[in-house]
Amino acid sequence: MSLLTADQVAKRFGGVQALNDVSFSIAPGETLGLVGESGCGKTTTGRLVLRAIEPTAGRIAFEGEDITALRARGLLPFRRKAQIVFQGPYASLNPRMTVGRMVGEPILVHRLADRHDVPGRVAGLLEMVGLLPEHAARYPHELSGGQRQRVGIARALAVGPRLIVADEAVSALDVSVRAQILNLLVALRERLGLAYLFVSHDLGVIRFVSHRVAVMYLGRLAEVGPAAELFRRPLHPYTQALLAAIPTIGDGTSSIFDQRERLLEGELPSPIDLPRGCRFVSRCPHRMARCREVEPPLQAVAPGHVVACHLYGEGNSHKGETA
């Protein structure tokens, strides 16, 4: 059974359709990487999963329970099971609170231990994320960026969650520190059986941590599949363009793509005035006449691999004719 299931979830902010008909699932202990350009709806998806914001339509179930139907009192048990690690390791920490107080606060809120037992629980959590017990007495400004993010991870782990939404959790860190935090997150996943929704624009990060990958474009999923298969054989033209944009060493001839053919042209359409038909039609090198009229549904092309593209419709040669 899936730990989390999103079924045709949509979110509108005023006149902007931020998400439309988004469906995916996450199994216990699995990492689903969510990737796409800035503004495509990745962070909105993470916030909806946590019920930090309300969906306009659709259903989100956690452990089989419809969390979109929960009200304030019913949400507290769910908050124990699903936590978040934010992008900014400094902005997400209270500068007036010590590390020990920040990590210990969720334990007290959820009544997981007596007050006199909290310091011991905090010390254990800090050690779990690679910090020393004495870090509990420090304030955020006394820590490095990597240490602050470790504190954010310890705070998320304090209530024993089953799912963590990692929202660009390493993008604000130096490259060497980023690798350390990624290794830590993977180790914690294996040790604690955690599931992650890992939101990032960095394909290298997504490839390293993910079991499956979901590619999002303008609020819709373009492709979802096993990480190894999607990176080896991307199907949607947008996924192909994202992978082609990864810098290569030397003259780039080692790339599996023709860079000139795959790199994106044109500007991202406005979410206020979305194109008719396929949302990628204005930038797609393989667009066909029907792409301008009919929005392609997600359809299975292999076990566990779905794509929203008319190139893979029934009876299509997969080559496409420019319209």
Image (tube, rainbow, N blue to C red):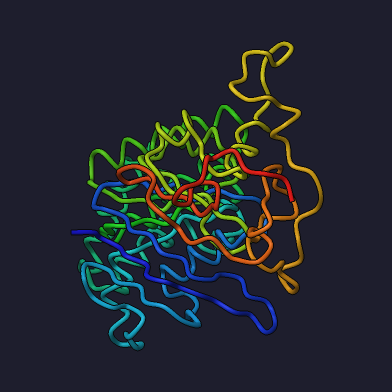
Q: Position of residue 35 (x, y in %)?
A: 54, 48
Judged from this view, the residue extending furthest toward the left is 1
Q: Is residue 144 visible?
A: no
Q: Position of residue 280 (x, y in %)?
A: 66, 55
- In the image, residue 260 sits, relative to residue 153, either above or below, namely above
Q: Quadrant of residue 20?
A: bottom right
In percent of the image, x 36 and y 87: which residue is there? 72
Q: Quadrant of residue 236?
A: top right
In percent of the image, x 23 and y 46: which residue is there? 193
Q: Quadrant of residue 127?
A: top left
Q: Quadrant of the N terminus?
A: bottom left
Q: Is residue 280 visible?
A: yes
Judged from this view, the residue extending furthest toward the right is 266
Q: Position of residue 149 (x, y in %)?
A: 50, 46
Judged from this view, the residue extending furthest toward the top is 250
In this rendering, position of residue 289 left or right of residue 198: right
In percent of the image, x 54 and y 34: which residue is there? 178
Q: Position of residue 150 (x, y in %)?
A: 45, 44
In percent of the image, x 43 and y 49: which residue is there? 224
Front-lying residue, 177 or 241: 241
In this rendering, position of residue 296 left or right of residue 105: right
| Number of disc labels | 0
